[in-house]
Image: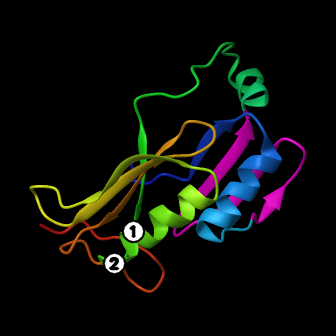
């Protein structure tokens, strides 16, 4: 089986607030949206933000937890960009969880939580190159 992810879907409580957050935080605009969901074309996959009630109905799982033990990561090409993105997220409504700092394994990272409780790591890793399309390559 091919190793790939086609779509990551985040359950949200307010579609307008979510779209505003991702537009202000990253400058992202949906490639498709309706009253329940917004899809964003990413580098090689699609990110969906779907009303939690609709996601519960679709999965037939009532009472989905508000968040799971998952973090999403946005890697940047330059070390100084970590703080820039964190600041944009916070000004767009995120909660700062961890100031940008240098972990023992190298690079730079910080954490924010979006208005729906999804945790984002903003990171720069000097040994993971990012190409022009935004694809990150795991190199060690």
> Which sits in the foreground, 38 or 97?
97
**Left or right, residue 53 beside residue 9:** right
The image quadrant where one finds the C terminus is: bottom left
Q: Residue at x 13, y 64 (%)?
A: 106
Question: Which element type, helix, strand or loop, lies under badge 2?
Answer: loop
> Which sits in the foreground, 95 or 19?
95
The answer for how far apart the CA atoms under marks 1 and 2 are is 6 Å
Question: Which element type, helix, strand or loop, lies under badge 1?
Answer: helix
How far across and down, in percent of the image, does residue 58 sit? 74, 26
* Residue interval drawn in magenta: 30-51
**Left or right, residue 121 beside residue 17:** left
Residue 76 forms part of the magenta stretch: no
Q: Which mark is residue 83?
A: 1
Q: Residue at x 25, y 65 (%)?
A: 108
> Which sits in the foreground, 58 or 47?
47
**Left or right, residue 23 beside residue 113:** right
């Amino acid at each position: 089986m091919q190793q790939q992810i086609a779509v990551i879907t985040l359950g949200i409580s307010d579609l307008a607030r979510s779209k505003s957050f991702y537009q202000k935080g990253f400058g992202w605009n949906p490639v498709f949206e309706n009253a329940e969901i917004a899809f964003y074309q990413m580098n090689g996959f699609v990110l969906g933000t779907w009303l939690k009630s609709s996601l519960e109905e679709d999965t037939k799982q009532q009472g989905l937890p508000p968040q799971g033990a998952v973090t999403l990561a946005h890697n940047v090409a330059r070390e100084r960009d970590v703080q820039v993105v964190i600041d944009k997220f916070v000004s767009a409504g995120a909660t700062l969880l961890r100031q940008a700092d240098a972990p023992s394994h190298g690079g730079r990272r910080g954490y924010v939580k979006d208005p729906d409780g999804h945790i984002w790591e903003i990171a720069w890793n000097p040994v993971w190159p990012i190409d022009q399309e935004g694809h990150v390559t795991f190199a060690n």
